[in-house]
Amino acid sequence: MTPGQYVCVCVTDTGTGMPPDVLARAFDPFFTTKPTGQGTGLGLSMIYGFARQSEGYAKLYSEIDKGTTVKLYLPATAAPRSRRSRCRRLRKNTRRRRARSSWWWRTIPSCAA
């Protein structure tokens, strides 16, 4: 993990836990231990992808017959961005993409100049 401040979101269950071979593959896309048709195997891989996209980390801890804990570490920020800076960034990205006309941001009250 890169040094810094993180916010940690933990989810724990008291299920059967995961053996080491399953734990090693748990974040793999489409990996599932469920029968065909009862799971896609995308849940934990999506959590992992979200964490990495956010410059964070996801960790799994599991013990047989005791349960599993998923810890999601997301980078903490020093201060929340102001509404004005979020709107400025939104307008800049919109202009850059030119996918839409820039009129729409004016209709959002929180982004009015």
Image (cartoon, grey):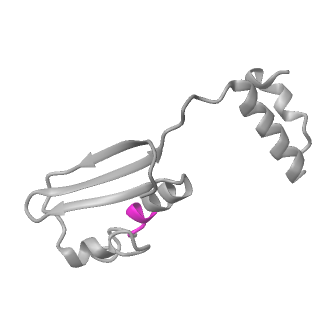
Q: Is residue 92 magenta?
A: no
Would you say 43 lies left or right of 15 here?
A: right
Above or below: residue 81 compared with residue 94: above
| Residue 86 location (% of width, % of height) | 72, 33
Above or below: residue 1 compared with residue 111: below
Above or below: residue 103 compared with residue 65: above
Q: Nearer the viewer, residue 88 or 94?
A: 88
Work out which residue is located at the far front of the displayed protein and give it. 3
The range drawn in magenta is 41-45
**Residue 99 appears in the picture as rendered:** no
Above or below: residue 10 compared with residue 61: above
Q: Is residue 43 magenta?
A: yes
What's the residue at 85%, 21% (across, down)? 113
Q: Main secondary structure of the magenta part?
A: helix
What's the residue at 19%, 51% (across, down)? 13
| Residue 44 location (% of width, % of height) | 38, 62
Q: Quadrant of residue 109?
A: top right
What's the residue at 56%, 57% (across, down)? 53
Would you say 22 lies left or right of 49 here?
A: left
What's the residue at 14%, 52% (across, down)? 14
Would you say 110 lies left or right of 91 here?
A: left
| Residue 76 location (% of width, % of height) | 49, 39
